[in-house]
Image (cartoon, grey):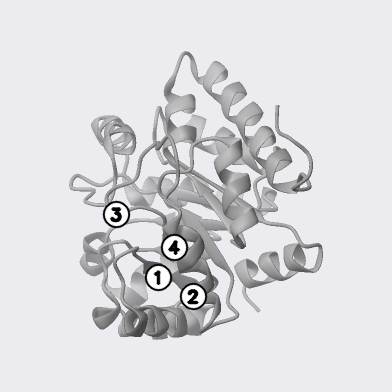
């Protein structure tokens, strides 16, 4: 069993929903990223997504694009991120999932890349620009190394494609809640509820919902719709970037705690 599967199994036994925050590596700097991972781990995160900055982040909205640009301007490289993770992951309870684009993997070669991230203690991968039809090589190699490649289901996916993605995805299935890029949204589309039921009809793998969750009420909504995980990105990235690094770390700690409290609250208890 992988670290991610083990995490969902433990939460499932307690009827809990996973909180999966996202931050961008190197924004504002890697020292702060290392501290942020530990802060999130202590503040209720169950799994943590770490975005690798990339010059052409097609799936990312303006908040995460700006964070990636700042990180790249500071010279953040994948090798530096992995070196940082190697020293941090043994201290974390939460598995780390890298969110990154396929060009960086292709450039290094699949086998070498997987060896590097495994040595750094990485548990999973989300590669938003890698379609299912081209993912077989990465899926097979990663499975052999105990690293989960998590595939995305889009709101526009038809039933046949949803079933194929659900069959192949490792660790959990990443359900994109909106058509478009990442970002803060004022409300979630009701179709997410129907998509969760549709995916649940073809697999018993955990399902995480992401893209657009920005507040406690929305995280709680996806839990009530039946999601196994709530993935929150831009709202964390925005808070971490505001003020000094210390202020940013304090802000994400409080936000993480509020989200975790919301998805542990019974459906009969109103949120503040």
Residue 270 location, quadrant: top right
Q: Percent x, y for residue 264? A: 75, 47
Q: Residues within 10 Å of mark 1 (few under 14, many from 20)?
A: many
Residue drawn at point x = 32 percent, y = 39 percent: 76
**Residue 131 appears in the figure:** yes
Residue that carries the numbered disc 1 in the rendered image: 151
Mark whose residue sits in front, 3 or 1: 3
Q: Percent x, y for residue 154? A: 34, 64
Residue positioned most to the left: 56
Mark whose residue sits in front, 2 or 4: 2
Residue positioned most to the right: 14
Q: Percent x, y for residue 233? A: 45, 42
Q: Secondary structure at mark 4?
A: strand
Residue that carries the numbered disc 2 in the rendered image: 199
What is the CA distance from the residue labelled 4 to the residue labelled 3? Answer: 11 Å
Mark 2–mark 4 CB contact (< 8 Å): yes
**Residue 42 appears in the figure:** no
Q: Residues within 10 Å of mark 2 (few under 14, many from 20)?
A: many
Number of residue marks: 4
Which callout, 1 or 4, points at the residue further toward the start of the chain? Answer: 1
What is the CA distance from the residue labelled 2 to the residue labelled 1? Answer: 13 Å
Which callout, 2 or 3, points at the residue further toward the start of the chain? Answer: 3
């Amino acid at each position: 069993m992988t670290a991610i599967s083990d995490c969902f199994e433990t939460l499932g036994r307690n009827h809990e929903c996973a909180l999966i925050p996202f931050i961008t590596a190197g924004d504002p700097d890697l020292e702060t990223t290392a501290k942020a991972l530990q802060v999130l781990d202590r503040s209720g995160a169950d799994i943590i997504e770490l975005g690798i900055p990339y010059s052409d982040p097609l799936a990312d909205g303006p908040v995460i694009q700006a964070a990636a640009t700042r990180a790249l301007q500071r010279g953040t490289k994948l090798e530096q991120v992995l070196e940082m993770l190697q020293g941090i992951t043994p201290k974390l309870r939460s598995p780390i999932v890298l969110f990154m684009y396929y060009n960086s993997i292709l450039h290094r070669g699949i086998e070498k890349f997987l060896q590097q991230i495994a040595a750094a203690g990485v548990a999973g991968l989300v590669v938003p620009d890698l379609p299912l039809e081209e993912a077989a090589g990465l899926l097979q190699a990663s499975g052999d190394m105990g690293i989960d490649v998590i595939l995305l289901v889009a709101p526009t996916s038809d039933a046949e494609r949803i079933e194929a993605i659900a069959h192949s995805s490792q660790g959990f299935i990443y359900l994109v809640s909106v058509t478009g890029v990442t970002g803060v949204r004022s409300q979630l589309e009701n179709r997410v509820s129907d998509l969760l039921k549709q995916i649940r009809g073809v697999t018993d793998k955990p399902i995480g919902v992401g893209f657009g969750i920005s507040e406690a009420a929305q995280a709680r909504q996806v839990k009530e719709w039946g999601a196994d995980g709530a993935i929150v990105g831009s709202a964390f990235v925005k808070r971490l970037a505001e003020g000094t690094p210390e202020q940013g770390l304090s802000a994400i700690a409080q936000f993480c705690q509020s989200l975790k409290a919301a998805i542990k609250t019974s459906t009969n208890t109103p949120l503040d």
